[in-house]
Amino acid sequence: MRRSGSDDGSDDGEGDFYAPRKLRKSDAGIKTRRRRGDFVEHWWAARWIESLERITNPGRLRRGRSYARGGQVLSVEESKGRIQARVQGSQANPYRVTIRLEPLSDRAWQAVIEALAERAIFSAQLLAGEMPHEIEEAFTAAGVTLLPASSDELESACSCPDWANPCKHVAAVHYILGEQFDEDPFLIFRLRGRSQEQIMAALAARRETQAAPAAMIAEEPAPYVTVEAAPPLEETLAAFWQMGQALHQFPTDFRTPAQPYPILRRLGPAGFAENLESELGPVYDAMTRAALREAFAADAADANTDTDPEEETQ
């Protein structure tokens, strides 16, 4: 059993047999996006932080937050299903931190894929680089969890002399990881043993397996019936490209996507371009600005304001 040190706020070597030492401040560390308040924005990253807070001593948790916001985490790298990091403490050499999330078995992943395949929205959102909010239901149905439910699923180690685990250096790396999960939700999947490409390929194969028998027994589709007869085309040519009266109150919602360029992400890698997002991204940005200007032109004229529509949608 590892011996816990004291939580008096002292720095490295906070155990019973180590004297407090002055922290070596670093200007080369990873800078957190938020200096105050919550570390993360999206729910999946917040769940990661919550799992950390359930298993970490409050004193070390407080010091870990301070280390993360102070730039003491020098590097965080993903390597072979684990996280390797360096954290600057009171010693000249940074401490080495390793974090590993227990991978799911092949059988567990098969059950997860079957649960995910039952809802098309999961595939659509995952293709767009988004984490479906109900995705934990699919893992629960498979009898497993995506995020660690207990300390037994999360392995961590640090080269510091503190016997407690997780120590404040490990906690600091957890907070930085939360920010990285914000930007790349599929990092959680990779730590569980599957990449985005593997998950999407498995879902596609599952859909093909389900579609084949259905296609063999498909019945003649029922005819499409409208509520009322549509007028002849020649009578509507003058207003053919105009929006009908029935759509004037149609609700619209302009929001920035959780991941940039979701359409390009759905298309996947292109054989004719090394980085399609970097080449077509500026074109999509220009199209978005032009579309927003056009969409809000009438409103801006009616309001007689100089408000930039693009700024209103940020």
Image (cartoon, helix red, strand yellow):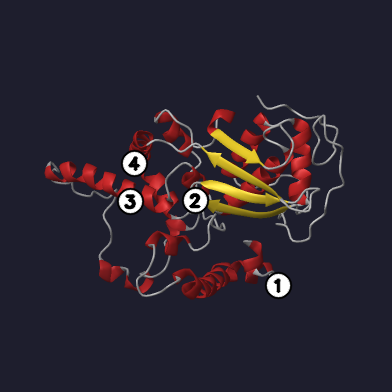
How far, Cα to Cα, is label 4 from label 1? 48 Å
Neighbours of disc 1 within 10 Å: few (<14), some (14-19), many (20+)? few
| Residue 201 horizontal side relative to residue 196, left or right | left
Which residue is the site of mark 4? 117
N-terminal label among 4 and 3: 4
- Marks 4 and 3 in Cβ contact (< 8 Å): no
Q: Is residue 41 visible?
A: no
Q: Earlier in the sequence, mark 2 or mark 3?
A: 2
Does label 1 or label 3 sit earlier along the sequence?
A: 3
Q: Amino acid at mark 1?
A: Asp
Instruction: Please state, as top left, top right, bottom left or bottom right, where the N terminus lies in the image.
Output: top right
CB atoms at circles 1 and 2 under 8 Å apart?
Answer: no
Location of residue 265 (image quadrant): bottom left
Residue at point 71% right, 37% down?
167
Q: Residue at x 37, y 50 (%)?
A: 198
Labels 2 & 3 near each other (Cβ < 8 A): no
Q: Which residue is mark 1?
A: 306
Q: Could you classify mark 2 by the number of other residues whose Cα lies within 10 Å: few (under 14), some (14-19), or many (20 or more)?
A: some
When the figure is inspected, residue 248 is found, relative to residue 80, above or below; the finding is: below
Question: Mark 4 vs mark 1: which is more N-terminal?
Answer: 4
The reply to whether discs 1 and 3 touch (Cβ–Cβ < 8 Å) is: no
310 or 256: nearer the eye? 256
CA gap, disc 2 and disc 3: 17 Å
Q: Residues within 10 Å of mark 3 (few under 14, many from 20)?
A: few
182 with respect to 56 (left or right): left
Amino acid type, callout 3 = Ala
Answer above or below: position of 234 versus 72: below
Which residue position holds label 3?
Answer: 201
- Of the 4 image quadrants, the one containing the C terminus is bottom right
Q: CA distance from mark 1 to mark 2?
A: 34 Å
- Of the two numbered discs 1 and 2 in the rendering, the one whose residue sits closer to the viewer: 2
